[in-house]
Amino acid sequence: MLSLLKQHKRKVVFAGSPRDFTVKDGYYQAHTIAGLLKYIKKKWHGNFSVVFRPPETGIPEALHNIALALLKLQLGYYNGEHTGKIMLAVDELNISFGHKRPRQFDGFERAILQGAHYGLELMGATQRPTLVHPDFRDNATVVYFFPVMGDVGDVVRACLGSEHAKELKGLKNHSFIVTDNGDISRGKNPPLK
């Protein structure tokens, strides 16, 4: 995910693992939503890379709150007052936006359905796509598939077709298959240093 995010100049990553998206990688570490928003406002006219680490409990609620805060922050884009987009990338999406998420936490769902109008782009990463809520899967225009060890599952077969899903098991490290609005291609990420 780190290499896929490099092209985005203004990004917020929602990630739990302290090993990923570190200061060394160029990411400001935010532990509260207030701290996240303060940092973004300070860097508003430039580029920013910030990671928000949700608490161990209440992960779906934290994603809900981040999504709503970013939508509110992007009201100027919605109203045509600026053109600055923000990428919200969610690591381990199956944990924060899975099938069993509490329905009252619909902020990320609003971002999925209306984010483009607010200049809020979304990226999700998971090794368990079948556990991600269909609202995200069904609205994804670009999906990267990396090598898997076990069964690829019905969701992956539905996205790629059986022939390409079989190919997924034989991919080498850092290789992927990508669907972009229905077009299928292959690629390779450079290893992270």
Image: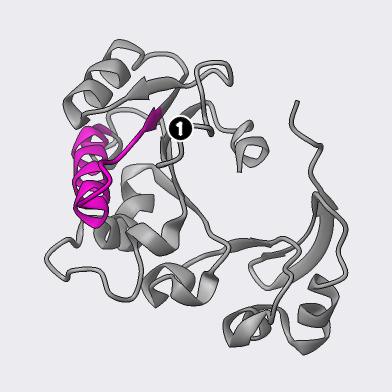
The image position of residue 166, as x and y in percent, is 82, 81
Image quadrant containing the C terminus: top right
**Which residue is rendered at x = 27% and y = 49% of the image?**
63
SS of the residue under disc 1? loop
Residue density around tag 1, few if under 14, some if 14–19, many if 20 or more, within 10 Å: few
User: 173 above or below 169?
Assistant: above
**Of helix, strand and loop, which mostly describes the magenta segment?**
helix
Q: Residue furthest top?
A: 42
Q: Position of residue 48 (x, y in %)?
A: 44, 20
Task: Please state which of residues 150 and 75 is positioned toward the viewer in this rendering.
Answer: 150
Name the residue beneath numbered marker 1.
18
Drawn side of residue 175 relative to residue 44, left or right: right
Query: Label 1 sits on what residue type?
Result: Pro
Residue beneath the point at 16% across and 71% down: 103
Q: Is residue 114 above or below residue 136?
A: above
Q: Is residue 177 left or right of residue 180?
A: right
Question: Is residue 59 in the magenta section?
Answer: yes
Q: Quadrant of the N terminus?
A: top right
Q: Is residue 60 left or right of residue 83?
A: left
Residue shown at 67% from the left, 36% from the top:
3
In magenta, the rendered stretch is 51-76
> Is 124 contained in the magenta span?
no
Q: Would you identify the image quadrant in which residue 162 lies?
A: bottom right
> Residue 119, percent across and down?
38, 42
Q: Picture coordinates of residue 149 (x, y %)?
A: 74, 70
Question: In the rendered image of this protein, does residue 152 appear above or below residue 121?
Answer: below
